[in-house]
């Protein structure tokens, strides 16, 4: 008779791997919700990608850690490092990208981006050809994101994130929106058509891994401290004598040869 | 034992839903952890100030003044509300959700706004904050905006709509009347406002817009020619003539229509249109005047009616 056994520890053991599959299932439904979220003008503007597996999640986490230092932004350094730990603890990461945010503004003169006539606030700040934004030009970007972006596209991405998180909360899985995971995912080539990406890690753990975070969490996280425990335990153990020769005397036990 | 009128209970239920939606708006998740969002429920006279603002322009310039303009969406929403009130007995009620996303206190220096640092963005915002030209340049959102604060705000709007969906309250996120509410000053201290009407509680009121044919007195199941022109191929051909070109290799291809060979040839052209500019400017001015006038009325109403 088939069985589906789930237990969250040891991590990536068969029982934990099954549990993580459930998280991926939730992420797929979250992606659906993001795709059907309210959208200005009903235009298709969102792409999504789900990333799972120990190696893949570690790849995103390592990129987040690399960005924590390479960006040179002291305000964000800890945030990126802490959130990398959270990504490793997650079942998967749902990446949502606004694939029209840079190259295809809504063109409604709405003013959210900057208020200039003809959406020129966005158009003037990117290289253009024949009145259209050149998607091949990524060289001018000196910042994390190649802005400015169309405000309506950002608004709609927010709707998508909101719907995805709404479904997560209804499915009783933990998730949160991260700029850091989105940036790392985008730099690694996920959501390949999007210049603006947000990451939503998903977890089905006993303890929500995205809240109740202590200072220096990139070091003082459970993975690291468990590893420290493994190290600390092993050294004193090596002073143990041959267990076949020397036994611990139990209470009331009479040892042969003793009075 | 008692008898309850289902329609009355439904209307009471919408107000209860509004309370629950308020919870969702403020409970909604954020990306930055620094979300500040404002919300307000408007009913009756407080709602009608927005309607009166648009009706004053329609009365002054006539419905035809709006055809082919960027004002079509706001006028279309206006008539959808109008018929809901007139034919469905809808007691107008809407949720207004707003936030000021033109200032960044994040310090992320991420570049998504177009500036290398939040400080430079904030300086530009302080000097240049303004509405977009949409709907006359005063009936829209203000920019520039921090993209992350915009997403935070959007999550609240999304949770409001999702809550209403779960509660079976007909709704739609409207930036048209949201922009109008912003310009009239409903939610002070905000740069962007979205309006979500609550009800009428019928199927797809804001999507299939049954109000529009009723408004035009359509009794049968056939659309009048005017609506066919407004919504059908005439509408599309005017906006996307390239979808109807004859052989594009010709320097000036015909724009096709039904039996186009029997009609004088039609061509698309690109160039200035002073008449259109003038007509649009006329609507701009009428809308500005109406907003200025009704802003005072709203202020007086706020003074008179206490907040509940």
Image: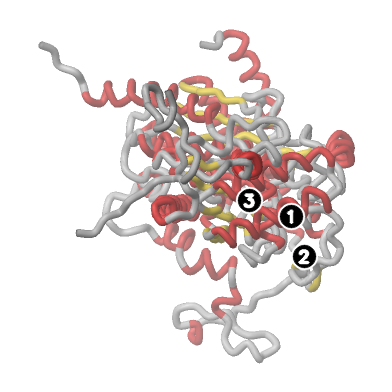
Q: Which residue does the numbered mark 1 point to in the structure image?
A: B277
In the image, which disc is placed on residue B272?
2
Q: Position of residue A182 (x, y in %)?
A: 65, 53
Callout 2: chain? B
Task: Describe residue A179's horizontal placement relative to residue B85 as left or right.
Answer: right
What whole-number distance in Å separates the C-alpha atoms at marks 3 and 2?
41 Å
Callout 1: chain? B
- Residue in the foreground of this view, choosing between B261 and B300: B300
Same chain assignment for discs 1 and 3: no
Classify mark 1: helix, strand or loop: helix
Q: Position of residue B48 (x, y in %)?
A: 51, 26
Q: Which residue does the numbered mark 3 point to in the structure image?
A: A198
Q: Are marks 3 and 2 in contact (CB under 8 Å)?
A: no
Classify mark 2: helix, strand or loop: loop
Q: Quadrant of the N terminus of chain B?
A: top left
Q: Report the mark closest to the observer, 3 or 2.
A: 3
Task: Describe residue A86's horizontal placement relative to residue A253 as left or right.
Answer: right
């Amino acid at each position: 008779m088939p069985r589906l056994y789930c237990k969250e520890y040891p991590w990536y053991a068969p029982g934990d791997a099954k549990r993580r599959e459930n998280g991926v299932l939730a992420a797929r439904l979250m992606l659906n919700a993001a795709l059907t979220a309210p959208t200005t003008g009903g235009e298709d503007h969102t792409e999504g990608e789900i990333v799972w597996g120990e190696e893949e999640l570690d790849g995103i986490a390592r990129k987040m850690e690399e960005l924590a230092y390479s960006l040179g932004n002291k305000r964000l350094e800890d945030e990126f490092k802490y959130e990398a730990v959270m990504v490793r603890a997650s079942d998967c990461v749902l990446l949502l990208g606004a694939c029209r945010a840079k190259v295809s503004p809504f063109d409604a003169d709405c003013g959210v981006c900057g208020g200039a006539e003809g959406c020129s606030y966005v158009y003037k700040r990117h290289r253009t050809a024949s009145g259209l934004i050149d998607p091949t030009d990524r060289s001018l970007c000196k910042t994390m994101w190649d802005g400015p972006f169309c405000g309506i596209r950002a608004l709609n991405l927010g709707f998508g994130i909101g719907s995805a998180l709404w479904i997560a909360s209804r499915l009783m899985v933990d998730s949160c929106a991260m700029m850091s995971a989105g940036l790392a995912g985008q730099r690694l080539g996920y959501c390949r058509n999007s210049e603006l990406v947000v990451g939503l890690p998903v977890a089905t753990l006993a303890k929500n891994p995205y809240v109740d975070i202590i200072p220096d969490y990139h070091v003082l996280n459970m993975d690291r401290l468990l590893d420290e425990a493994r190290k600390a335990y092993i050294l004193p153990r090596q002073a143990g004598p041959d267990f076949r020769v020397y036994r611990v005397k139990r209470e009331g036990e009479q040892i042969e040869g003793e009075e | 034992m008692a008898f309850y009128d289902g329609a009355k209970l439904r209307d009471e239920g919408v107000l209860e839903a509004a309370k629950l939606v308020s919870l969702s708006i403020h409970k909604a998740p954020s990306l930055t952890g620094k979300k500040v969002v404002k919300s307000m429920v408007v009913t009756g006279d407080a709602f009608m100030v927005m309607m009166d603002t648009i009706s004053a322009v329609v009365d002054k310039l006539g419905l035809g003044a709006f055809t082919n303009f960027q004002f079509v969406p706001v006028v279309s929403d206006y008539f959808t509300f109008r018929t809901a009130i007139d034919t469905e007995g809808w007691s107008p009620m809407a949720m207004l959700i707003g936030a000021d996303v033109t200032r960044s206190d994040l310090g992320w220096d991420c570049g998504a706004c177009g500036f290398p640092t939040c400080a430079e963005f904030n300086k530009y915002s302080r000097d240049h904050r303004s509405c977009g030209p949409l709907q006359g340049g005063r009936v829209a959102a203000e920019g520039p905006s921090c993209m992350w604060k915009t997403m935070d705000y959007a999550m609240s709007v999304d949770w409001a709509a999702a809550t209403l969906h779960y509660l079976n309250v007909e709704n739609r996120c409207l930036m048209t009347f949201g922009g109008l509410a912003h310009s009239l000053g409903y939610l002070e201290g905000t740069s962007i406002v979205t309006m979500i009407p609550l009800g009428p509680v019928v199927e797809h009121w804001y999507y299939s817009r049954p109000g529009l044919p009723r408004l035009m007195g359509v009794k049968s199941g056939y659309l009048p020619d005017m609506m066919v022109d407004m919504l059908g191929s005439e509408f599309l051909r005017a906006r996307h003539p390239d979808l109807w070109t004859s052989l594009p290799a010709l320097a000036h291809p015909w724009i096709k229509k039904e039996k186009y060979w029997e009609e004088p040839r039609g061509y698309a052209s690109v160039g200035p249109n002073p008449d259109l500019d003038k007509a649009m400017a006329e609507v701009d001015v009428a809308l500005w005047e109406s907003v200025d006038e009704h802003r005072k009325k709203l202020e007086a109403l706020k003074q008179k009616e206490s907040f509940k």
